[in-house]
Amino acid sequence: MAIPPVVDQLDKFLDLTNDEHQLFRQFNYSYVWNAVLLNSGIPIDTGINMISPKAAVGVPSVPSTYAFLPSGLEGVHSVFGSDHFLTDEQVKCRILDDAVTVRSVLEYNDSQGQETRLVDFHNDSPFLFTVPPDAVRAGFFDRLEKLLGASRTW
């Protein structure tokens, strides 16, 4: 079995030690969702990476749609990310709103009047685990490695 090292999830069925609690609480992670849109109006062979000209390296602030990527099928994948929790319904609404904005700004057709809709949606959170540099310098990974084989769970 595999499970992300998120204390709230682990506590549901494991009896974590104080050391495990202390270590796992240091993880930071982001949230990511992906979806397939139908009738997006974006051409089938077109990928769109969202940018923010005002941002230091052009990456839009989160939460936001990262990209609309071509799938090779009639539909467009989208990838949405956030640095904090959002409900799936909030994300679905943002993706659909962003698709309408992209279509309008780039003057793509409106899919012959058909409504843009999500035909597949996945919440792949939590995503991209990191720990602060100070935790790494303080031996975080050495302490994490020492858990291997402890309590016959790691």
Image (tube, rainbow, N blue to C red):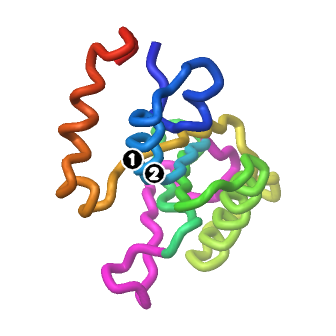
Q: Which residue is mark 2?
A: 29
Q: Is residue 57 left or right of residue 2?
A: left
Question: What's the amino acid at mark 1?
Answer: Leu
Quarter residue 48 falls in: bottom left
The answer to whether 133 is drawn above or below residue 131 in the figure is below
Q: Residue at (53%, 57%) from the top-left corner? A: 81
Q: Is residue 109 left or right of residue 55?
A: right
Q: Residue at (61%, 41%) from the top-left corner? A: 36
Q: Residue at (63%, 69%) from the top-left corner? A: 103
Q: Is-magenta flag for residue 148? A: no
113 or 13: which is nearer to us? 13
**Residue 66 on image: x %, y %:** 48, 61
Q: Is residue 78 left or right of residue 148?
A: right
Quarter residue 119 falls in: top right
Q: Residues within 10 Å of mark 1 (few under 14, many from 20)?
A: few
13 or 100: which is nearer to us? 13
22 or 102: which is nearer to us? 22
The answer to whether 118 is drawn above or below residue 153 in the figure is below
**Residue 128 tag number:** 1
Q: How many marks?
A: 2
124 or 25: which is nearer to us? 25
Question: What's the amino acid at mark 2?
Answer: Tyr
Q: Regarding mark 2 in the picture, which secondary structure is present there?
A: strand
Is disc 2 in contact with disc 1, using a CB cutoff of under 8 Å? Answer: yes
Q: Regarding mark 1 in the picture, which secondary structure is present there?
A: strand
Q: Residue at (81%, 53%) from the top-left corner? A: 115
Q: Is-magenta flag for residue 40? A: yes
The magenta span reads: 36-60
Q: Residues within 10 Å of mark 2 (few under 14, many from 20)?
A: some
Quarter residue 47 falls in: bottom left
